[in-house]
Amino acid sequence: MRVALITKDKPDSLQVRMDTRESHLAYIKDTGVVEQAGPFLDENGTMCGSLIILNVDDLAAAERWAENDPYAKAGLFANVVVQEWKRVIG
C-alpha cells in the first residue's frame, strides 16, 4: 500500500533540518520503502516540511517508519499526517 507522509516543520527549525539531513537521506536509502520524497518550500524557497510517499504493508508500518525518521527523532516536525494514498498518474 502507498502512504503519504505530509509534515510541517516547527518554526525557525531550518538548522535542525540541515543538521539532520544526511541521516534522514541515509534512512530513506537504507529502509528501501520510499518511492518519492522532497521538501516543501516556503515563499522564500526555504525548506519547511516534507512530502514522502512510502510503499509499505500497512499504516502501522508507515507510522513506525515516520517515528524512526531522524527528522522526527530530532524534533523537527510541528505535525505529521500519515494518510493512505492511491497513485493515479505517474
Image (cartoon, rainbow, N blue to C red):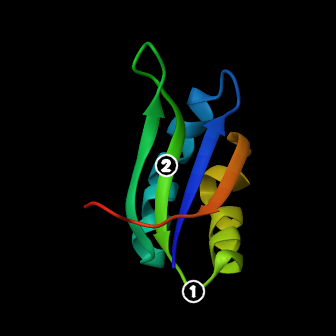
The local secondary structure at tag 2 comes to strand
Residue drawn at x 67%, y 75% as measured from the top left = 59
- The amino acid pointed to by label 1 is Asp
Q: Check whether the beta carbons of the residues at disc 1 and disc 2 lie within 8 A of each other.
A: no
Residue drawn at x 39%, y 65% as measured from the top left = 87
Depth check, front residue: 82 or 31:
82
The C terminus lies in quadrant: bottom left
Q: Position of residue 78 (x, y in %)?
A: 74, 37
How far apart are the alpha carbons under marks 1 and 2?
19 Å
Give the label on residue 43, or none: none
Q: Tell me if residue 47 comes above or below residue 4 in the rendering.
A: above
Residue lying at the far bottom in this picture: please name it.
57
In this figure, which residue is indicated by the disc labeled 1? 57
Q: Position of residue 57 (x, y in %)?
A: 57, 86
Depth check, front residue: 87 or 36:
87
Residue drawn at x 67%, y 66% as measured from the top left = 68
Q: Tell me if residue 52 comes above or below residue 20 in the rendering.
A: below
Please tell me in which quadrant of the rendered image residue 15 appears. Answer: top right
In this rendering, position of residue 23 left or right of residue 13: left
Crowd class of label 2 (few under 14; some 14 to 19; many from 20; radius 10 Å)? some
Q: Position of residue 65 (x, y in %)?
A: 62, 70
Residue drawn at x 69%, y 49% as measured from the top left = 80
Q: Tell me if residue 16 comes above or below residue 55 in the rendering.
A: above
The local secondary structure at tag 1 comes to loop
Depth check, front residue: 57 or 48:
57
Mark 1 or mark 2: whose residue is earlier in sequence: 2
In this figure, which residue is indicated by the disc labeled 2? 51
Q: Tell me if residue 19 comes above or below residue 44 in the rendering.
A: below
- The amino acid pointed to by label 2 is Leu
In this rendering, position of residue 82 left or right of residue 57: right
Crowd class of label 1 (few under 14; some 14 to 19; many from 20; radius 10 Å)? few
